[in-house]
Amino acid sequence: KDDPDDPYVEQELLWSLFSNETFEQCYKFRHPGGSTEPYVIYGSINGLVCISDEIFNCASPIHIWNPSVRKFRTIPMGTNNVKFGYIALQFGFHPGVNDYKAVRMVRTNKNAFAVEVYSLRTDSWKMVETIPPWFKCTWQHHRGTFFNGAAYHIIEKGPLFSIMSFDSASEEFEEFMAPDAICNLWWLCIDVYKDQICLLFRFYGCEEERMRKFDFWVMQEKRWKQLCPFIIPWNYYYGTIGISIDNKLLMLKRDDIRGADLCLCNYESKQDLETGIKLALIKYGEIEFLFSITY
């Protein structure tokens, strides 16, 4: 019989909710519609969770789910039915219009773009009519985040990187060039730190022996301000997941014996804390993915 604690034995993938203070498990989530297929959380805010297929396409059903009251809504299908392309889905709340929004962006194989916005209040999609010409770029499964009513994505144009923002109410696009020090996307993370969009970028080199360095920027008045870097021990393989709701760095801590664990790094005290929470790794060929939720 397989050992359920063995990180190398394939297990059923479940999402779990843990206390942000005690790290105790509160709930285990199964698909609200009863599906046994893997699903992914594409955003969460104010107790609502947006879920859809793990392999997402324009025909994938999208559900807005409130796990605490065990209710969900399957939203209407969008107007875009592209069969082949790169698709991103994000979900969040826009305080300016007091509405929950989902943003779906599609890049076809011919580098044509389409953006749709869903409103929970009207239960309908709207196609964005005007796409800026600078948005025609390489854009394929790069990380993004949703903050204060806007979707943010990392995009690349040849050797350069920038951050795209899209306001889900005004439908306005903006572009912000990434700091010059960012030279690849493998160790780049975008998230929200103290109500500011932030970037974390891991460098191989560090002045302190047996330590890893993550350079850190926050966006202030549409400009990047570099803060002191995160410095963490070299003992384990560390990967950046994001920023917690109490502004701690969420880290994947992994070794060949114990598997993957979630730990927190306090930026101000420079101390890391092991939570005891095990993380699931999903592998496609030689590429591994890890998904997380801030609830």
Image (cartoon, grey):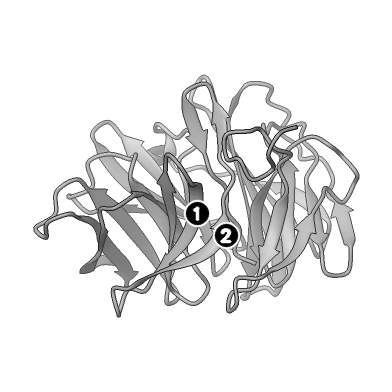
- Depth check: 41 or 248 in front? 248
Query: Is 244 left, or right, of 232 in this rendering?
Result: right
Q: Is residue 174 visible?
A: no
Query: Is 176 left, or right, of 249 in this rendering?
Result: left
Amino acid residing under circle 1: Asp
The C terminus appears in which quarter of the rendering? bottom right
Badge 2: few (under 14), some or many (20 or more) residues near its Cα, within 10 Å?
A: some
Q: Is residue 95 above or below residue 11?
A: below
- Depth check: 253 or 172 in front? 253
- Which residue lies at the image location 31% right of the left edge and 35% below the top edge? 157
Place residue 174 in its image quadrant: bottom left
In the rendering, at what x and y percent does residue 282 appear? 58, 36
Per the image, label 2 sits on a secondary structure element best described as: strand
- Depth check: 145 or 173 in front? 145
- Which residue lies at the image location 76% right of the left edge and 37% below the top edge? 79
In the rendering, at what x and y percent does residue 294 appear? 59, 64
Q: Earlier in the sequence, mark 1 or mark 2?
A: 1
Amino acid residing under circle 2: Ile
In the rendering, at what x and y percent does residue 279 appear? 57, 50
- Which residue lies at the image location 83% right of the left edge and 47% below the top edge? 31
Whether tag 1 and tag 2 are in contact, CB under 8 A, the answer is yes
The N terminus appears in which quarter of the rendering? top right
Q: Which residue is mark 1?
A: 261
